Amino acid sequence: MSRMSYEQTGVAMTCRSYDEYVRMFDLKDADLRNGEVLDVAAGGSSFTAEANGRGIPAMAVDPRYEGNAALWISEAAREIDDSTKKLAKIAQVFDWSYYGTLEKHREGREASLRRFEADASGNFGLHRYVAGRLPELPFDDNRFSLLLCSHFMFLYAGQFGPDFHLQSVIELMRICRPGGQIRIYPLISLNWEPYPELDALLEAVRANGGKPELLPTRLPFIPESDYFLQISL
Ligand SMILES: C[S@@+](CC[C@H](N)C(=O)[O-])C[C@H]1O[C@@H](n2cnc3c(N)ncnc32)[C@H](O)[C@@H]1O
């Protein structure tokens, strides 16, 4: 494995699309139409906007939603520029079979951010985009049928310790209803190192009544990052 890594200080606000989520988490229509869906650490993703546009009742939670919407949207737009420059320096490490080129990757992010902006600053914004921060989320027990967490939990393993991850996963299990699922991707850090505490975390999930599985993602891009974590309750 290369010694290169994706340079990042703090947690970025990125904006992946509905299609990226569907592929990342191998989502089937039945997974999405089984009750309420929550995008955790949603950032500027258009998943929630597009899901609702398809009649799927989805919400998003992120600490950034505390502030003014115009601020998060301009931050997410700057992040597209920054990440494009960073990716250009290490482009050869990634699998471009889904995105095609760096320019198409950038265009996809811009389109996703426009959808997010229209939805988050529209009438539904206040109900769909909720300010909240792991490891404690402002939702009742057993509420959601599907919880998705893209590019937050283990990606920033260096900034948050194993206690944070354990508490956060237990919190996601609290707000997931019996019969529901939690899906988390990726399971590696920004240095593309596998999350070192995964076995202990999976043991704790089992001890709390969850069934963890590693399942193949359909979003090729990050090196050696072929699986997402699914927890069934
Ligand atoms: C890299 S972005 C991912 C956005 C989106 N899920 C995507 O895949 O494009 C990470 C997000 O995690 C959010 N975040 C940071 N700390 C958090 C916490 N303690 N709990 C939940 N989300 C957090 C950030 O505000 C940021 O929007």
Image: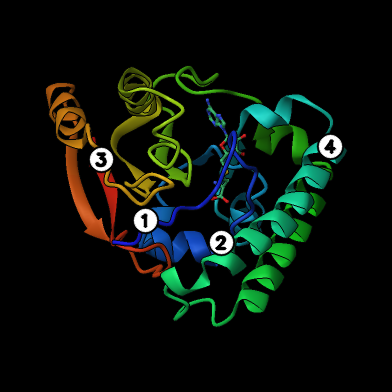
Image quarter where the C terminus lies is: top left
Mark 3: which secondary structure?
Answer: strand
The numbered mark, 3 or 4, whose residue comes first in the sequence reads: 4
Q: Which residue is mark 4?
A: 71
Q: Secondary structure at mark 1?
A: loop
> Which residue, given by chain and number where applicable, does mark 3 sit on?
231
Q: Amino acid at mark 1?
A: Arg
In percent of width and height, residue 39 lies at: 52, 42
* Residue positioned 59% across, 33% down in the render: 10
CB within 8 Å, label 3 to label 4: no
Work out whether residue 224 can be spotted: yes
Residue behind mark 2? 18
Q: CA distance from mark 3 to mark 4?
A: 34 Å
Q: How far is disc 1 from disc 2 in space, using C-alphas?
A: 31 Å
The image's colouring method is: rainbow
For the residues labelled 2 and 3, the Cα–Cα distance comes to 21 Å
* Residue at (78, 51) in percent of width and height: 78
| The quadrant where residue 172 appears | top left
Mark 4–mark 1 Cα distance, whole angstroms, equals: 35 Å
State whether residue 66 is above or below residue 25.
Answer: above
**Residue nearer the viewer, 221 or 6:** 6
Which numbered dot is residue 3? 1
